[in-house]
């Protein structure tokens, strides 16, 4: 209790679904451009997001099916991070372990100019790190990479054990 007799609520006690982003876009762009190890930083952010969403917002209830966790990432997580859903989620025709999450213009690439000699550089690897940490931390071990294709495509490749576990759940 404070000296004034009122209880102060911490920003951590407020629900995530309310309020608007409080960081200006230009400030975000400046800070983001200074980050070097994007994928690893994204993983660290993703681990924290697991705590926020599954422990606080969903009372510890996590998804157990593969498609449900992917839809959570595409919609709920994406809306919280970027204010809208990801553009598309597809399952690979060639590999049952691979899914593609697509976004036409990721926020992290909006203010980055890539030199011609570094045309394969995609700063969306930061987001790939977030996705990988959220999936792996919730029991869906995967490797996520970012590629230039129809904007940016996040290739999510699940471990064989994850896919076989999901098949067993479907059989029940």
Image: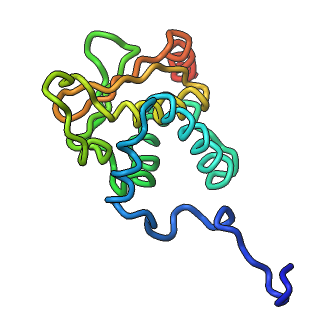
Seen in the picture, residue 83 relative to 88 is either above or below; the reply is below
Q: Quadrant of the N terminus?
A: bottom right
Q: Specify the quadrant of the image occupied by residue 151.
A: top left
How far from the left and from the top, in percent, is residue 146?
32, 27
The residue located at (80%, 86%) in the rendering is 6
User: Coloring scheme of the render?
Assistant: rainbow
Whether residue 138 sits left or right of residue 96 in the image: it is right
How far from the left and from the top, in percent, is residue 139?
61, 26
The residue located at (35%, 51%) in the rendering is 30
The residue located at (34%, 23%) in the rendering is 155
Front-lying residue, 50 or 129: 129
Q: What is the tally of numbered marks visible in this picture?
A: 0
Whether residue 2 sits left or right of residue 26 in the image: it is right
Whether residue 151 sits left or right of residue 97 in the image: it is left
Front-lying residue, 64 or 34: 34
Q: Quadrant of the C terminus?
A: top right
Front-lying residue, 23 or 162: 23
Seen in the picture, residue 98 relative to 71 is either above or below; the reply is above
Q: Residue furthest left?
A: 116
The residue located at (46%, 31%) in the rendering is 129
How far from the left and from the top, in percent, is residue 23?
43, 63
Seen in the picture, residue 15 relative to 117 is either above or below; the reply is below
How far from the left and from the top, in percent, is residue 142?
49, 20
Q: Residue furthest bottom?
A: 4
């Amino acid at each position: 209790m404070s000296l004034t007799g009122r209880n102060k609520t911490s920003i951590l006690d407020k629900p995530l679904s309310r309020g608007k982003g409080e960081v200006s876009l230009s400030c975000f762009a400046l800070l983001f451009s200074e980050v070097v190890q994007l994928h690893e930083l994204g993983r660290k952010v993703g681990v924290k997001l697991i705590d926020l969403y599954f422990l606080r917002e969903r009372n510890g209830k996590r998804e157990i099916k593969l498609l449900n966790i992917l839809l959570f990432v595409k919609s709920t997580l994406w809306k919280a991070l970027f204010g809208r859903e990801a553009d598309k989620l597809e399952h690979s025709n060639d590999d049952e372990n691979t899914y593609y999450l697509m976004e036409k213009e990721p926020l992290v690439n909006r203010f980055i100019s890539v030199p011609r000699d570094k045309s394969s550089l995609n700063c969306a690897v930061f987001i790939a790190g977030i996705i990988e940490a959220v999936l792996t931390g919730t029991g869906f071990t995967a490797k996520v990479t970012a590629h230039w294709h129809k904007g940016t495509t996040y290739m999510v490749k699940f471990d064989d054990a994850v896919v076989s576990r999901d098949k067993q759940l479907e059989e029940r």
